[in-house]
Amino acid sequence: MEFFDTLYRRKTVRNYTGEAVIDVQLAKILKAAQASPIGLKRYDTLHMTVIRNKAFLDKWEQKVYAETGRMPFYGAPTLILISSVLNDAPYDNVNYSNAAIMAQNMALAACEMGLGACHIWGAVRTLNKSPELLAELKIPEGMTPVCSVIVGMTDETYEERDVPDRITTVYFD
Ligand SMILES: Cc1cc2nc3c(=O)[nH]c(=O)nc-3n(C[C@H](O)[C@H](O)[C@H](O)COP(=O)(O)O)c2cc1C
């Protein structure tokens, strides 16, 4: 897809076949994160965990279900978790934003290849309250998971979408 075509066709996908993402595609998705702009080039404040362990995703999903009554991963086979450094004044907003930008770069890369993607923020809150799950992931010392994106094969297609102006915007000239 052309860049603007990808941008405007992109949508959140909450429906996955469960098939594994092939390595070449996963590598491109991860490379998209590596291509992200990162505030002050502080690459060492960020960490990615590529989770393909179904037993782990199921365990995590059940915890979210117990809390919210919702299954958050929609059958996706791969979740990329991004951890960052929190309570790092004056960079707090930068550290969160870096992670979000990486997630969106990955979501766009997945869309470009016809894969589904969905930002998963809610389930990360549950993860952060589950020391036993966190321990399994071995997140580097001083880092905290802040967001994630699921990717996977989907039967959904990316159709042309209407993108209305729905976020208030003012010009201050
Ligand atoms: C920061 C952020 C967090 C989100 N968290 C979740 C989530 O936890 N679960 C989910 O299903 N969708 C999540 N989404 C997807 C939004 O619900 C979705 O982007 C919104 O409904 C607009 O739909 P669209 O992406 O198809 O344009 C998140 C999106 C963003 C940007």
Image: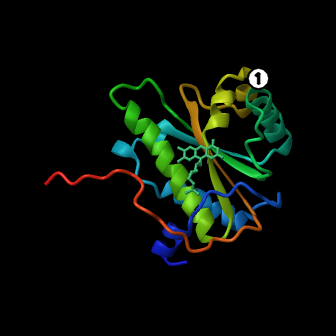
Residue located 60% across and 31% down the image: 140
- Classify 10 Å Cα crowding around label 1: few (below 14), some (14-19), many (20 and above): few
Quadrant showing the N terminus: bottom right
Quick check: 161 above or below 48? below
Q: Which residue is mark 1?
A: 132
Q: Disc 1 marks which amino acid?
A: Glu
Residue located 64% across and 52% down the image: 118
Q: Position of residue 124 (x, y in %)?
A: 64, 34
Quick check: 8 above or below 150? below
Q: Position of residue 18 (x, y in %)?
A: 83, 57
Quick check: 91 above or below 3? above
Compared across the picture, whether 43 is left or right of 71 comes to: left
Compared across the picture, whether 98 is left or right of 18 comes to: left
Residue located 64% across and 26% down the image: 128
Q: Residue furthest left?
A: 173
Q: Position of residue 49 (x, y in %)?
A: 65, 43
